[in-house]
Image (tube, rainbow, N blue to C red):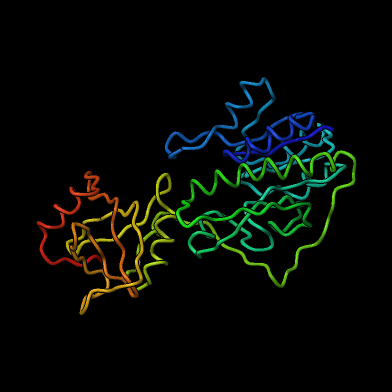
């Protein structure tokens, strides 16, 4: 079966490798140029394709008429989108005689939209997953072909959870791709009454609100910690502090402490929240990365301080 693939990121490679395992003929790959200014901690689909001598293209806008015409001339049986960053026009979706499919990093219809791996952590979900679904004009709204659940560990970060989702995607595709080849794959509509949609996130969205409870703050930190832009707060003098890792404790609070107030106890650095405290474990101030004793000593020299 002739496949045209739109792919990016580690999930794109997971999808491409599954297609090859299941003996699909990858006629061409569309991806994005690797941005040298981006913190690219993930693998390059372009390099992956070049190493295997597979045709690969990186158009700035794949929906331009010239590219739509070229895609029509390729006459694919099916189209797959694996974390490609552009929505495909109906002129492209309608080219494939056996359908166009998208791999999404959540259990649809929940968490439609951008960066679902970050959002499920921010909201403290215990379970997420991956979904293969038909592509339609509305993003992430097409009929579902298959899903694979993934448990979220309390210590998962966006990076570790994304790794789990990539592995789950490979397993899901190994189950459904043989069925797609024979036309026996399932297809069922999404329940629109259960749909939730979230937008993309910006680095500035990582600011910590100390009035929230300790668990909510911890969920934000683990959702945006390295290699993502990170959660942050400020000292009263305007200096920025990045919080790369912390642990929540809602069992106790410091009496008469204001939210955001820093307290030192038992050689640890704590911050009072709206309910419970956050124990800081890995922070960065300016160019100083502070952990353990170094962080404790740093705050010891500051006297009474409150993060805002």
For the point 69% across and 25% down, the residue is 55
Q: x and y percent of residue 271 in the render?
A: 26, 65
On-image quarter of the C terminus: bottom left
Q: Nearer the viewer, residue 137 or 125?
A: 125
Q: Position of residue 57 (x, y in %)?
A: 65, 30
> Is residue 173 found left or right of 248 in the rendered image?
right
Please indicate whether residue 91 sits to the left or right of residue 128 in the image: right
Q: Residue at x 79, y 29 (%)?
A: 23
The quadrant the N terminus occupies is top right
Residue positioned 68% across, 57% down in the render: 139
Residue 32 at x, y = what percent?
58, 36
Q: Dividing the picture into quarters, in which one does residue 305 lie?
A: bottom left
Asked if residue 268 is positioned above or below residue 2 in the image, the reply reads below
Measured from the top left, where is residue 299 in percent x and y? Answer: 16, 57
Number of disc labels: 0
Q: Residue at x 43, y 39 (%)?
A: 39
């Amino acid at each position: 079966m002739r496949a045209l693939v739109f792919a990016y990121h580690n999930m794109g490679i997971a999808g491409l490798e599954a297609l090859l395992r299941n003996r699909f003929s990858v006629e061409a790959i569309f991806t994005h140029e690797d941005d040298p200014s981006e913190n690219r901690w993930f693998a390059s689909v372009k390099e992956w394709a070049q190493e295997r001598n597979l045709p690969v293209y990186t158009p700035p806008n794949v929906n331009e008429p010239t590219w739509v015409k070229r895609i029509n001339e390729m006459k694919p049986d099916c189209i797959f989108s694996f974390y490609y960053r552009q929505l495909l026009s109906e002129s492209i979706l309608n080219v494939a005689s056996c359908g166009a499919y998208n791999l999404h990093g959540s259990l649809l219809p929940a968490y439609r939209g951008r960066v679902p791996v970050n959002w499920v952590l921010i909201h403290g979900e215990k379970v997420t997953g991956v979904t293969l679904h038909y592509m339609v004009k509305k993003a992430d709204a097409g009929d579902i072909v298959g899903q694979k659940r993934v448990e979220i560990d309390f210590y998962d970060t966006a990076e570790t959870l994304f790794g789990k989702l990539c592995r789950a995607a490979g397993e899901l595709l190994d189950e459904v791709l043989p069925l797609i080849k024979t036309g026996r794959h399932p297809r069922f509509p999404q329940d629109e009454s259960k749909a939730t949609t979230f937008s993309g996130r910006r680095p500035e969205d990582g600011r910590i609100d100390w009035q929230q409870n300790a668990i909510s703050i911890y969920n934000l930190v683990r959702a945006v910690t390295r290699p993502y832009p990170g959660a942050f707060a400020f000292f009263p003098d305007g200096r920025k502090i990045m919080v790369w890792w912390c642990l929540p404790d809602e069992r106790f609070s410091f009496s008469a402490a204001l939210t955001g107030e820093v307290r030192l106890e038992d050689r640890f650095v704590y911050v009072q929240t709206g309910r419970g405290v956050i124990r800081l474990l890995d922070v960065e101030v300016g160019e100083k990365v502070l952990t353990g004793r170094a962080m404790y000593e740093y705050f010891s020299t500051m006297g009474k301080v409150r993060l805002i």
